[in-house]
Amino acid sequence: MEEPKINDIIIVGGGTAGWMTAAGLSSMLGKTGLKITLIESEAIGIVGVGEATLPHIKFFNESIGINEAEFMAATAATFKLGIEFVNWGRIGDSYIHPFGEFGLANAGIGFHHYWRSMIDDEATGALDEYSLPIMASRMAKFKPPSEDIRSVHSTYRYAYQFDATKYAPFLRQHGEVRGVKRIEGKLTQVHLHPENGDIVAVELENGTVIKGDLFIDCTGFRGLLTQGALETGYDEWSNYLPCDRAVAAPCTSHGPLLPYTRATADKAGWRWRIPLQHRTGNGHVYSSQFISDDDAQKSLIDNLDGEPLSEPHFLRFTTGKRKKLWNHNCISIGLSGGFLEPLESTSIYLIQEGITKLLEYFPNKDTLATDRDEYNLLMDLEFERVRDFLILHYHATQRDDSDFWNYMRTMKIPDSLSEKMELFRARGRVASYDRGLFLQPSWIAVYLGQGIIPSKWDDRVALLPEKDVKHHLAGLKQLMRQSADIMPSHADYIAQYCLSEARI
Amino acid sequence: MNQLRRIMVIGNSIEAWLSAAYLRARLPRNDYQIIVIETAENSMASSHTIFARPSSKNLHHILDISEANLSRVTHAKPALCATITNSKGAIIELPFGQYGVDREGTEFQHIWKFSGSQQPLAEFNLALMMHKAGLFINNAPKGAPTYDYGYILDEQGYENILKSKASTQHIIANSLKLNCGNKGIEEINCNGESLSADLYIDVRSNDFDMAWNHNHLKIMGGFDMLDHQSGMRLYRIQMAMERLFKLWPDREFAAIEIAEYNRLEKAQSVHINDMNRLLQHNIQGCSDALKRKIRLFESRGRIAIEDFEIYSKAEWIAALKAIGISAQNYDRLAHRISAEAALQWIDQLHTAIANLVQQLSNKNTGKQ
């Protein structure tokens, strides 16, 4: 009996999601006889989602055989050690969510318990001072982590900040070398099977009909296949995350090249600042219920570090996700699947997870339903856990300077999040999960950074004499400062490792 | 001061002494008093041995019990799998090692299925093959399927070693009454005397709705033969202690921390119950998680991994196959190599494993 294999996969839409999917699938499944076709139209612009990323992208790039230095030079990328949040807990506050640990656990008790027990002592200082990636970020330093686990330089990871409009063309080269067939054309029609409702083919403006077994919708917010043809529906999360628009404008670089992204809370949203080699990416994510487009644009332009390089570009979105990320024989990857504002740089991560899980649950025609159910279950969980983490940033605030912040501070949040927050408030415990993107250090960074100070800490801290705890803290602080100090500057490291032509 | 200072462990046998030893290892002697109230109930029909999963190595590290000491006092024998005899008399072996070797990002069982190999999957599990031949070596040779090992321990010897590690006051309870109120245990009456503590750890339970209620922490005792054979008797205590220390309370016993403990405990119990149902071939009305595992495995030999998973993929595969559930298909990634090359590679691996077992057997150096 012939195996009911999926032989033809059609990706509709280029851009970051489309070409990441094509590169990932061709790299892993290209040898299995799978034919991959990507349809895109140069007439349709790309959103270029996700200039800032999370450390996971390094693994994705490595798995498809990308050379890091070449990739960074081609996309004018910089290194990223974390995200700075300014004005979130209160106006004037600043903290960094680092890609690494805080301090060192001692006797099975998390470092933040020791820190919490000593915060009334002026010498203790901010939690940030006990994190090497944060100290390096503040000093604009960078070097890759050490592989020696005994070294403090092994306690962090890194991601990239890059020009997203250059990433897709870079991946295209990789995909095409591995046999991805690119078709230039605009989609005009989707043909459904008259009985089971699956997608049978897509039709282009020039009348070409392209048949496939499995379709990947990378058509962005419009979701031409999943929504336009299959009417999948959308779970809206605007009640929790009411920002629905963004305005973006790059500007000239100014000041030292920083190895971190900055998210500054504004009156009705927040502004991003992403330093690339050749320019700085900027944007303002906001809620149209609370601020006009004009005022949002003005706030963005007024706060640019350098000279604007282009006219501001507006985007509209609805926070949420498709009711089924995989519906019939169509998988939505990227913006067609859902949108969560890029506050924690999760856009590309969610694309990557979509691809990874598709590879893990790649179907046959006869197992499609089982694989689809599992994929949807796991991806829903990813989206929901990221959503809760984003809500935390807005809800854990003391700001009362605008209607927006009053709403965010007092709104009802998901039970799953309120229980986590209550647990941390009680004694600095972080709810345990094996799965989900954000692990304990991330939750600790945001809780403490936004002023959720646990009322108590682990009792067993008191078993160590106070002077020993102080000595331990002082030693760690000094270690982090000195270790950051000996790193090369971020700009120097980039210059010798992966200087982009765009910068030269 | 609101700190816990006095902790009572109520129960007997391995469960009580392991709990006490763990507390002793993690809490300074000068700051915490630990008392064992040794009760008379039998935990289970003793088989004179205790089975410890590979995770017990970490437990013994915490308790500062070296492998040499364990071997000397308990006549410890390494165990490369858990051997279960279910209520129908069927013997099921859950290996502590992987099936074959993953290749090009593809799990072995998919390549095996794709290749059409006639060799049973179990013969690619080095842990199982060595177990069947009564052999053991500490580490798998390079390129061979990896494995870990647990122990079969003499129960009395193990209890003795735990008692010495606990090194704590104990009271033999000829009579015991727990006076419980809304806030856990108010006091206990032991041999006609009223006693109290800040926290009571009760390891006699075999059925409860809520593991932790205020100052009363219940840990599932080893009343079940299946738990005994699969190593859950020790594992439940080990996990309960790890959770307790992650959420170490004070005398206020914050409800949110207790709820978190109970959430984690419940998640773990679901996994154990699911595995036990499989081992007993009793899957009617099973949990959604187990239904999902069965569905996915039947479809393509995949193992769904949940939060707080206890068993390895290899153990789930062994348990599913033991009750006759087979994968109908395999992962597409298996096609990354040709069927011919896959079969050739599979045959070579099979020969290599068989030769290794034969060599060890001939040398007689690896005999357990």
Image (tube, rainbow, N blue to C red):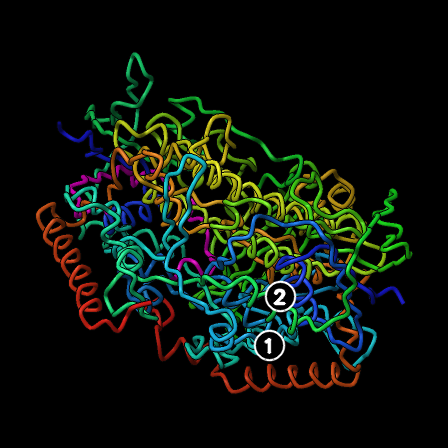
Residue A314 visible in image:
no
Residue B81, position as x, y percentages in the image: 38, 55
Say which residue label 2 marks. Answer: A96
Residue A463, position as x, y percentages in the image: 77, 76
Q: Is residue A61 left or right of residue B100?
A: right
Q: Is residue B22 above or below residue A104?
A: above
Residue at 72 percent of width and 86 percent of height: A471
Q: Does B144 appear in magenta?
A: no
The residues tagged by marks 1 and 2 sit, at their Cα atoms, a distance apart of 10 Å
Q: Is residue A391 left or right of residue B116?
A: right
In the rendered structure, the residue with mark 2 lies on which chain? A
| Label 1–label 2 contact, CB within 8 A | no
Q: Is residue B322 above or below residue A477?
A: above
Residue at 76 percent of width and 41 percent of height: A407
Provide the secondary structure element on which disc 2 rests: strand
Q: Residues within 10 Å of mark 1 (few under 14, many from 20)?
A: many
Which residues make up the magenta segment?
A29-58
Q: Is residue B69 left or right of residue A425?
A: left
Residue A503 visible in image:
yes
Q: Residues within 10 Å of mark 2 (few under 14, many from 20)?
A: many
Q: Does A54 appear in magenta?
A: yes
| Type of amino acid at the residue the image marks with label 1 | Met
Depth order, front residue of B147/A260: B147
In the rendered structure, the residue with mark 1 lies on which chain? A
